[in-house]
Amino acid sequence: MQYAEFMNEALAEAKQGLAEGGIPIGSVLVLDNQIVGRGHNRRVQLSSAIRHAEMDALESAGRMTAKEYQHCVLYTTLSPCAMCSGAILLYKIPTVVIGENRTFMGEENLLRERGVNVIILHNPECEELMREFIKNNPTLWSEDIGE
Amino acid sequence: MQYAEFMNEALAEAKQGLAEGGIPIGSVLVLDNQIVGRGHNRRVQLSSAIRHAEMDALESAGRMTAKEYQHCVLYTTLSPCAMCSGAILLYKIPTVVIGENRTFMGEENLLRERGVNVIILHNPECEELMREFIKNNPTLWSEDIGE
């Protein structure tokens, strides 16, 4: 599959999160061109402070070796915050593909400084989903990004 | 309570983790001099890639407001890795008290650069616990830090 197809899987996760009453951010973890983990933000659903989409995808993949992570690509519909970027650095995931970074700019510079390949797709559907959500849920969104 | 007393609570979490067959790292989250979250590394127990001790403590505290996090102190028996440091930055936790950083040096420099007050206690019990664990479980330890 190409970037766009895996991003569609991350988008499907984001939409599922929205349908559950949650924050519409989705992520998939891909190893050797296969999805090995997938998830979405579950702050609302699990009353969780740590289940951002990327963390949820990493958790769903379960325990993996350092070598496996180092062959992964992480897809996320939104630019990854400091926590999710830190997880990417911990596990030395070499490539991160981001749906959009206009509604929220995460730690892309830090990732690049540490050698991570950061690819931005500027996907209009990812952006519209977040823009609409933030407009309608500003307090919940602020909570999710610690602001 | 003073630093040493809260660190003893984090140590109690670390020892509980060890008793469960897990990695002996513990953490407590303190707001206005009261423990509001506590946890320990649960990689083994939950087959989790994200439940480092600090993440487990944040998760046990549940959903908190940005303002609350900004009045917290996070105690951890071991220097926080990139993921846990990222969570500290996301939630703008102003002070982190660390048991020891000799068996593993986390992202203390990044935290300081971003204005976090980083306090190292050089607690011999924290250090001995990790030194013994790493000696006996080098593969598991490598997995936990993505190496």
Image (cartoon, coloured by chain):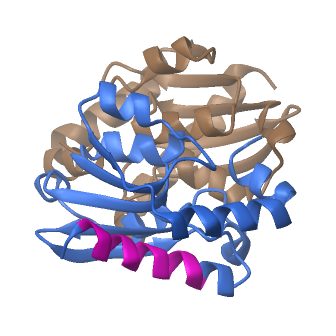
Chain colours: A brown, B blue
Q: Toward the viewer: A39 or B82? A: B82
The residue drawn where x is 84% and y is 66% is B136
User: In the rendered picture of this protein, how many numbered marks are placed on residues?
Assistant: 0
B101 relative position to B144: left or right:
left
The residue drawn where x is 67% and y is 69% is B23
Q: In the rendered image, is residue B126 in sight?
A: yes
- Residue B132: x and y in percent read 74, 67
Rendered image quadrant of residue A70: top right
Q: Toward the viewer: A120 or B29? A: B29
- Residue A116: x and y in percent read 63, 18
Compared to A11, does B30 lie above or below? below
Compared to B43, does B91 lie above or below? above
Q: Toward the viewer: B142 or A34? A: B142
The N terminus of chain A appears in which quarter of the rendering?
Answer: top right
A115 relative position to B85: left or right:
right
Rendered image quadrant of residue A21: bottom left
Task: Look at the magenta stretch and give its main secondary structure.
Answer: helix
A138 relative position to A107: left or right:
left
Find the residue positioned furthest to the front.
Answer: B124
- Residue B87: x and y in percent read 40, 47
The residue drawn where x is 19% and y is 45% is A142
- In magenta, the rendered stretch is B3-16
Compared to A95, does B119 lie above or below? below
Compared to A80, does B80 lie above or below? below
Q: In the rendered image, is residue A24 in sight?
A: no
The C terminus of chain A appears in which quarter of the rendering?
Answer: top left
Look at the image and say whether residue B44 sits in the magenta stretch. no
The residue drawn where x is 61% and y is 46% is B104
